[in-house]
Image (cartoon, helix red, strand yellow):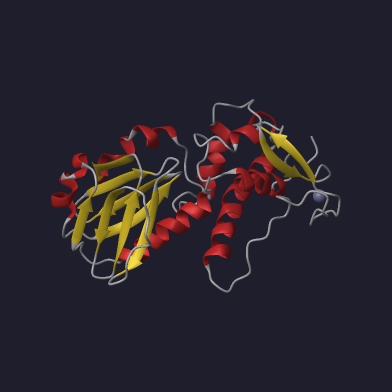
Amino acid sequence: MPEGPEIWRAAARIAGSLGSGPLTSVVVGLERLEPLEGALLGACVLAVRPRGKALLTSFSTGHTLYSHNQLYGVWRVARAGAALPPTTRALRLSLSTAQGTAALYSATDVELWPTDSVHEHPFLQRVGPDVLDPDVDLDAVTARLRTFPRRRSRLGALLLDQGFFCGVGNYLRAEILWTASLHPSRTLASLSDDERGALAAALLEVPRASLRFRSARGERRFTFAVFGRAGRPCPRCGEAVVRTTDGGRRLYLCVTCQPL
Ligand SMILES: [Zn+2]
């Protein structure tokens, strides 16, 4: 499953392919989506923003397209005049401007909402703040760590719960816990002020570093400190990184830097 940085990069590709000009073509592949053609033709894309695994594409008409890829949905993009990559998938929606085309295939959740009420969408009501959302800052994250009700859940489980924060998947979980020097069995209730501050900072810094390093061509790739590095030295203390499983998924940590 893609994690936040992959989803934000996909959103940037869609926004980049369409640019800011008006939609010159709207093609739908489902009968129930036919009203989108009239609603969106001529509209300009204002922003393409993920929230967890949902994508919110807002338009100058005051509408926002909510789409969630679930397991099979995929967006493809092409410059104007170029063909979209061939696929056997079923088209749901294709948006074109003078600059390019973005087409969504196979997704089951595609809905048009008024922008000012899309936050009421049931999925968006369930998910926590997205750690890659530039509007989510350290104060907001720290406050959520202080007030989130599940005080005695293990951090290893909480970090994969999209209702806590979204955008964090399995590799980011390991890297965030290592960066904050916290064992996955620690709980919110057990954190000191300093530890809470370190976790809040890591929740923002680690996903953002991953997005930054991998999105700029020519820059060095984001390198994992512990994820996938079992037996290799911890970059902080030199002890061997340990592989374990947590919630049925692999987790890597340094038991010296992250004592229980
Ligand atoms: Zn270490």
Q: Is residue 205 above or below residue 125?
A: below
Q: Considering only vertical position in the picture, is 150 above or below 170?
A: above
Query: Which residue is the extreme one toward the right?
Result: 239
Give how far across and how far down residue 204 sits, in percent.
57, 51
Which residue is situated farthest in the left direction here? 38
Q: Does residue 232 appear to the left or right of 20 in the view shown?
A: right
Q: Viewed as shown, does residue 198 lie left or right of 238?
A: left
> With 209 as the anchor, is 100 left or right in this view?
left
Image-quadrant location for residue 205: bottom right
The quadrant in which residue 150 appears is: top right
Nearer to us in this view, 150 or 217: 217
Residue 232 lies, in percent from the top left, at 82, 54
Which residue is painted at 38% across and 37% down in the image? 124
In this view, the residue in front, 187 or 80, is 80
Q: Quadrant of the C terminus?
A: top right
Tell me where residue 84 appears, x and y as whole percent. 34, 63
